[in-house]
Image: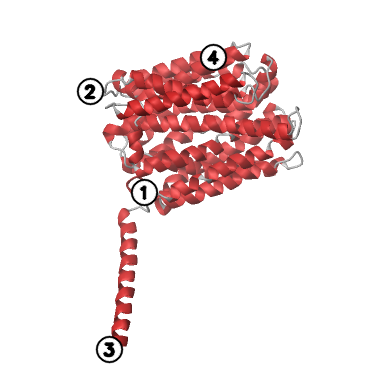
């Protein structure tokens, strides 16, 4: 097997474990909440704390891989994730569970970015779309089998076992990583920006955690406001610090690159909307419609099945139409299918729900492949470590914000309806809100140049140039004809 397939498949082993874990937890959230004595909406802290941990520790991933070698860091990250999984299984309170999820986030913060860095440094840009598709295809098996597997285990056994299944998967991942991944490291690693990491970590943690607990009643409002304020001040100090640092831990100067900027800003809005779906949908199925976790998993897995169906076609579609056209139109299409979830009621046939989720997953998968790939179109090899770090932080913050906004929308609807019991009617506004946010991303994708990412997509830039030349020639001819007519009238 050539490296364009072998390396993505090895990286996908970690993504498989991480993605399956996330979907299993979403499906089993109501059962876990009931067992440890809290509400499903409060337990969203288990999701946001994991995503927050990712965002805080991801900035250190690029330098760590350069300094200690990708293989060592990758294997150690899987081991940390496994320890966190054991901690989740042994949790008996919301505090224990959130702490274990933070430890899992530390492992995940190294697994995905380091794996992506290995891929970017090993694969030629012309084959990057295909390699990305190969990397995410096996990883999508996790979300496909995660909901029904998590539902089956939760319904017929105990939710604790959904974390223990990570142990054999992690051991297999470490074995293949040690055997096949080269210990890639930089011969001259940059100086580690510890001061910047502390400032950025405090900033990201304060803002994201403060927003996630707002309105839940877990902390007094002065403390919530203080968390957000401290986070904002810390991020401001980091931005001032980054301007004076040669190797900042988060290099925002890369935002000058057109394709990376569009991927970051547009991708943030798109992920913010789509990121709420895995949180809202299982709650709607189980609490709103009264389905068991197993039944809910069988319904929601359709979205991931649709995503798998897109992966073999993604490279061909992007090559045919180009990044700009695909990402603009597809953002709107994906948002429509997300908004369609607001129409689901207990009377809606489950088959119709599965079809909508299946087709929606198909288009969302195409969008994610395009966003993940075009970000690196203009990035030079020496900048890859910083770019993967910056992009990964943005991705995780967007998903975390999506979960928080989705939950906040549900809570606001309950307050407006003056009810304290969660029902199916409380979810529709939340789906509309996140769908509108995802649709706004189309504006930023449309602002990319026509030939954005042409060296990655395989869509020949010369074809675009010839079209522009033809248009220019036509305009010139029209101008000359107009001038001739004017001259004739004057004559």
**Residue beneath disc 3:** 491
| Front in this rendered view, residue 271 or 74 | 271
Distance from disc 1 to disc 3, alpha carbons, whole Å, reads: 48 Å
Crowding at dot 3, Cα within 10 Å, few <14 / some 14-19 / many 20+, comes out as few
Distance from disc 3 to disc 4, alpha carbons, whole Å, reads: 87 Å
**Residue 40 lies in what quarter of the image?**
top right
**Residue 98 lies in what quarter of the image?**
top right
If you read the primary sequence from the N terminus, does the residue marked by circle 3 or circle 4 appear first? Answer: 4
Q: Is residue 297 left or right of residue 367?
A: right
Q: Tag on residue 188? A: 2
If you read the primary sequence from the N terminus, does the residue marked by circle 2 or circle 1 appear first? Answer: 2
**Residue beneath disc 1:** 452
Crowding at dot 1, Cα within 10 Å, few <14 / some 14-19 / many 20+, comes out as many
If you read the primary sequence from the N terminus, does the residue marked by circle 4 or circle 2 appear first? Answer: 4
**Residue beneath disc 4:** 99
Distance from disc 1 to disc 4, alpha carbons, whole Å, reads: 42 Å
Q: Closer to the observer: label 3 or label 4? A: 3
Q: Is residue 235 left or right of residue 217?
A: left
If you read the primary sequence from the N terminus, does the residue marked by circle 3 or circle 2 appear first? Answer: 2
Q: Secondary structure at mark 3?
A: loop
Distance from disc 2 to disc 1, alpha carbons, whole Å, reads: 32 Å
Q: Closer to the observer: label 3 or label 2? A: 3
Residue appearing at x 42%, y 38% in the figure: 264
Q: Residue furthest front?
A: 222
| Front in this rendered view, residue 442 or 160 | 442
Distance from disc 3 to disc 2, alpha carbons, whole Å, reads: 74 Å
Q: In which quadrant of the rendered image does the C terminus lie?
A: bottom left
Q: Secondary structure at mark 2?
A: loop
Q: Is residue 140 left or right of residue 131?
A: right
If you read the primary sequence from the N terminus, does the residue marked by circle 1 or circle 4 appear first? Answer: 4
Q: Percent position (x, y) of residue 488? A: 30, 86
């Amino acid at each position: 097997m050539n490296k364009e397939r072998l390396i993505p498949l090895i990286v996908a082993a970690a993504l498989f474990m991480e993605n399956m874990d996330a979907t299993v937890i979403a499906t089993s959230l109501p059962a876990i909440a009931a067992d440890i004595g809290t509400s499903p909406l409060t337990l969203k802290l288990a999701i946001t704390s994991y995503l927050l941990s990712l965002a805080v520790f991801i900035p250190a991933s690029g330098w760590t891989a350069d300094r200690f070698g990708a293989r060592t860091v990758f294997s150690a990250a899987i081991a940390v994730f496994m320890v966190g999984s054991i901690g989740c299984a042994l949790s008996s309170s919301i505090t224990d569970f959130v702490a274990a999820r933070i430890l899992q986030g530390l492992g995940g913060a190294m697994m995905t970015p380091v794996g992506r860095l290995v891929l970017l440094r090993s694969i030629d840009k012309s084959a990057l779309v295909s390699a990305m598709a190969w990397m995410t295809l096996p990883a999508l098996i996790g979300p496909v089998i995660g909901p029904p597997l998590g539902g089956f285990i939760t319904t017929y056994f105990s939710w604790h076992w959904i974390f223990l299944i990570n142990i054999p998967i992690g051991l297999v991942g470490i074995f293949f990583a040690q055997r096949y991944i080269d210990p890639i490291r930089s011969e001259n690693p940059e100086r580690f920006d510890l001061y910047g990491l502390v400032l950025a970590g405090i900033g990201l943690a304060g803002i994201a955690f403060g927003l996630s607990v707002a309105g839940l009643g877990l902390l007094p409002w002065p403390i919530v406001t203080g968390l957000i304020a401290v986070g904002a001040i810390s991020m401001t100090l980091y931005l001032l610090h980054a301007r004076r640092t040669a190797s900042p831990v988060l290099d925002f100067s890369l935002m000058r690159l057109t394709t990376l900027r569009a991927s970051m800003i547009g991708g943030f809005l798109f992920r913010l909307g789509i990121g709420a779906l895995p949180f809202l949908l299982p709650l709607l199925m189980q609490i709103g419609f009264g389905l068991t976790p197993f039944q809910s998993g069988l319904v929601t897995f359709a979205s991931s099945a649709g995503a798998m169906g897109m992966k073999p076609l993604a490279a061909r579609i992007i090559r045919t139409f180009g990044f700009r056209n695909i990402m603009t139109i597809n953002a709107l299409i994906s948002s429509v299918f997300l908004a369609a979830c607001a129409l689901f009621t207990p009377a809606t046939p489950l088959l119709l729900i599965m079809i909508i989720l299946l087709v929606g997953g198909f288009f969302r998968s195409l969008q994610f492949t395009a966003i993940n790939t075009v970000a690196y179109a203009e990035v030079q090899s020496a900048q890859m470590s910083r770019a993967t770090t910056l992009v990964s932080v943005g991705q995780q913050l967007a998903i975390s914000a999506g979960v928080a906004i989705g939950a906040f929308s549900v809570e606001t609807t309950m307050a407006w309806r003056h009810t304290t019991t969660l029902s199916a009617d409380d979810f529709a506004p939340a789906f509309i809100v996140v769908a509108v946010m995802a649709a706004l991303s189309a504006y930023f994708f449309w602002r990319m140049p026509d030939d954005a990412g042409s060296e990655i997509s395989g869509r020949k830039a010369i074809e675009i140039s010839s079209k522009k030349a033809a248009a220019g020639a036509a305009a010139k001819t029209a101008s000359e004809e107009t001038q001739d007519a004017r001259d004739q009238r004057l004559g």
